[in-house]
Amino acid sequence: MVLIIGGAYQGKLDYAKEEFKIKDEEIFFCNNENTNIDFNKKIIANIDKFVLAMIKNKKEPIIYIRDNIEKFKDKIITCEDISCGIVPIDYEMRLLRDSIGHCLSILSKNSDKVVRLFCGIPMELK
């Protein structure tokens, strides 16, 4: 598993596609509504949006990640890191921030490689 994190618009997906020679049809794009992941794709893009969809649907994203960790093993995962900055006052947004942090901890622990992108520059963390 490869986990690629970074802020918004830092080039996570472009980096993944170029670095691992991935075609567009091999990418599953998470969105704010879908609570299922297509594990047949090579890249799982924007897993942070999947976490938000789970929260909005009163489901536990951390449990989903833990229960399906073996399905993530051969995947490249991108996630927007929202852990920096001011803690949101809104309960749902605070829960999102906390849940993404917990999910990233699980994913990074199980990843072979973790890369942080900042201004399009990859920094290998693991």
Image: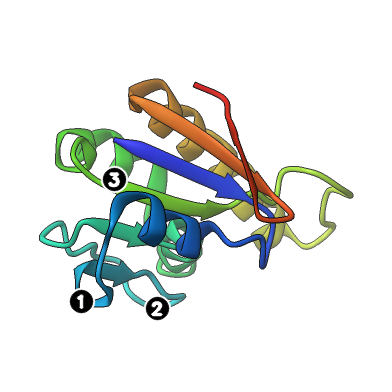
Q: Residue furthest left?
A: 40
Look at the numbered disc 1 and give the secondary structure of its residue. helix
Mark 2 residue element: loop
Q: State how far apart marks 1 and 3 are (Cα).
A: 24 Å
In the visual, does 90 lie left or right of 35? right
Left-right relation of 118 to 107: right
Q: What is the CA distance from the residue labelled 2 to the residue labelled 1?
A: 20 Å
Residue drawn at (32%, 58%), measured in percent from left and top? Answer: 44
Q: Distance between the residues labelled 2 and 3?
A: 15 Å
Residue toward you, 5 or 15 = 15
Dot 3 crowding, Cα within 10 Å, few <14, some 14–19, many 20+: some
Residue 4, position as x, y percentages in the image: 49, 45
Residue at image coords 66%, 60%: 10
For residue 4, which numbered disc appears in the image? none
The image quadrant of residue 124 is top right
Query: Which comes before the other along the chain, label 1 or label 3?
Result: 1
Q: Quadrant of residue 109?
A: top left
Which residue is located at x 23 percent, y 35 percent?
Answer: 69
Residue sitting at x 36%, y 38%:
2
Q: In front: 27, or 58?
A: 27
Instruction: Name the residue carrying label 3.
Output: 64
Q: Which mark is residue 33?
A: 2
- State left or right for residue 74 relative to residue 103: left
Q: Position of residue 76 (x, y in %)?
A: 32, 48
What amino acid is labelled 1 in the image?
Answer: Glu
Task: Name the spot of residue 22 as percent of width and height, x first.
Answer: 26, 62
The three-letter code of the residue at mark 2 reads Glu
- The amino acid type found where label 3 is placed reads Tyr
First along the sequence among labels 2 and 3: 2
Residue at which label 1 appears: 25
Q: Is residue 38 above or below residue 75?
A: below
Reply above or below: 26 against 12. Answer: below
